[in-house]
Image (cartoon, rainbow, N blue to C red):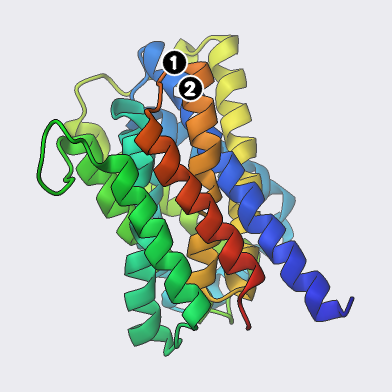
Amino acid sequence: MSNNDNKNSFAVFGLLFGAMCWGIVWYPYRIMAEAGVSGVVSSFYTYAIATALVGLYFARHWRSIFKLPLSIFWLGIIAGWTNLSYVLAVIDGEVMRVMLLFYLSPLWTLILAHFLLDEKPHLAGVIAIVASLLGAYIMLNDSTSGGFPMPKNSAEWLALSSGFGFSLTNVITRKSIHLSLLAKSLSIWIGVIAFSLLAAPFIQLPFTSPSAFSLINWLVMVAIALLLVAATFFVQYGVTKIEATRASVLFLFELVVAAIASNYLVNERMDFHEWVGGGLIVVAAVFAAFNHRD
């Protein structure tokens, strides 16, 4: 196997591992919400912990911060909103419905990558995206309500906006090859911290002080932070090495993890048509992985 094949294989692994982390991270956030800590507050602390851990490790590179280009600013804003809105959506909404609205992102990625990256989708990529969207439609479709599936509450609109932000984040990451993996990751986390502070005055629950947390609360938040660090580094590496459209489809593996986790952890059951749709999404992800040429 060539060196390029090894890099591509590791990039695919990175995306799938990141998807697994994002498919389960909603659960500890819900634990925090049940303890009376809002999603905005828990996002602030968990991303602050992640930033502190990585920032301390790479503190010797602090001078390079002043040499970063403007694109890092836009990445931080867009990815910050993407991650915060995702957390808020999965805390308050139905996990699988939120996930599926988020994963309309392959459609946004296809459009954005065409206009911003000049990427021409291969036939396999188009087939995979169509199959994944068809799977999402089948899973979301409720025969009792009729009409085209649409967001029905604020959590689902947040999920939709997060999916678009995720696609734009991937495209900017792919375009910003001059930025280091560390710079991209820290900008994302700082973006979440900034948005959390901006949103703090508008939440109903008070902004919890550090002294109010129990040991269990801190352990949960540190666990979330470690998941965030792992997921961010792996995903940022993957989307840097793989075309944006393919990366977006591979990341649909998160749906599989979320479906299993929501079933066993919070007893959210999936109907037969949801399993059929989920199966289509899995097939699309595997098809994209084995039928793509960089």
Secondary structure category for the residue under label 1:
loop
The three-letter amino acid code for the residue at tag 2 is Asn
Closer-to-camera residue (167/96): 96
Label 2, residues with CA under 10 Å away: few <14, some 14-19, many ≥20: some
Label 1, residues with CA under 10 Å away: few <14, some 14-19, many ≥20: few
- Could you tell me if the residues under marks 1 and 2 are in contact, i.e. CB atoms within 8 Å? yes
Residue holding disc 2: 263
- Residue 93, percent across and down? 29, 30
- Residue 207, percent across and down? 32, 24
Residue depicted at 59% across the width and 82% down the height: 178
* Left/right of residue 165 with respect to residue 185 in the rendered view: left
Closer-to-camera residue (240/193): 240
Residue depicted at 58% across the width and 80% down the height: 177
* Left/right of residue 28 with respect to residue 13 in the rendered view: left
Marks 1 and 2, how far apart at CA: 5 Å
Closer-to-camera residue (33/134): 134
Residue depicted at 20% across the width and 33% down the height: 201
- Residue 47, percent across and down? 50, 40
The three-letter amino acid code for the residue at tag 1 is Asn
When asked about the image quadrant of residue 157, the answer is top left
Secondary structure category for the residue under label 2:
helix
* Left/right of residue 37 with respect to residue 14 in the rendered view: left
Residue holding disc 1: 267
Q: Inspect this view and state whether residue 85 appears.
A: no
Quarter occupied by the C terminus:
bottom right
